[in-house]
Amino acid sequence: MSDLARTGRGELVRVARREGASPEDAVECVQDALCTFLQVAQKRELPADTARWSAYLAGVVRNAARNKRRLHHVAKPHDDLDALPLPLTAGASAESLIAEAEEHVRLRACVDQLCETQKAVVMLRLLEEQPGEDVAASLGITRGYVDVLLHRAKASLRVCMTDER
């Protein structure tokens, strides 16, 4: 079963991407499908034919990607994979896209662990690239405190990202 997850992961991500899922959503769909697969395996005996396992997983991934697309209204089904927005490394291999998506998901989880003020500073200062003075004014804090919060947030993110590897 673990061999199936390791060897079929790239193909399952491609299935989700063909359904219009972003790289991050595609990885999440595959992880959800593997969890569902394990739940089914615990409830009943799976067929001995591993080809049927792959088809089952591909169906679960396909449905999960369609559901995500419906929720987010991202792309239409069966769009050309090349027309979908890709990370900065366009033309990269499926494995490198998976690694980038997993890294992004991990970073997002680490940001979610920050306190609300640090999270707001990170979002405004780093992601929206607002000047420190504007961030301070919008949050009602001093410019110096914005710098302190950003420094602490970066330290927390560094620890979080290295601990989870």
Image (tube, rainbow, N blue to C red):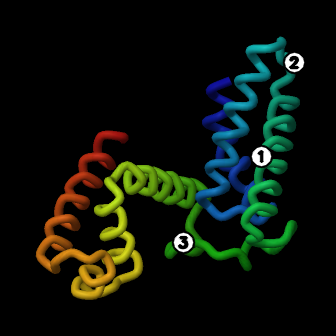
Give me the disc on residue 109. Answer: none
Q: CA separation, marks 2 and 3?
A: 38 Å
Mark 1 vs 2, N-terminal side: 2
Q: Which quadrant holds residue 140?
A: bottom left
Amino acid type, mark 3: Pro
Tell me what residue is drawn at x 20 percent, y 56 percent. 155
Tell me what residue is drawn at x 35 percent, y 83 percent. 129
Amino acid type, mark 2: Pro
Amino acid type, mark 1: Val
- Percent across and percent down for residue 20 are 76, 65
Q: Which residue is mark 2?
A: 47
Q: Which residue is mark 3?
A: 87
Quadrant of image for the C terminus: top left
Quadrant of image for the N terminus: top right
Tell me what residue is drawn at x 50 percent, y 75 percent. 88
Q: CA separation, marks 1 and 3?
A: 21 Å
- Residue 35 in the image: above or below residue 115: above
Q: Residues within 10 Å of mark 2 (few under 14, many from 20)?
A: few
SS for tag 2? loop
Q: Residues within 10 Å of mark 1 (few under 14, many from 20)?
A: many
Q: Which residue is mark 1?
A: 61
Report whether 27 appears left or right of 52.
left
Report whether 105 appears left or right of 35.
left
Single out the residue that lies furthest toward the front. Answer: 140
Mark 2 vs 3, N-terminal side: 2
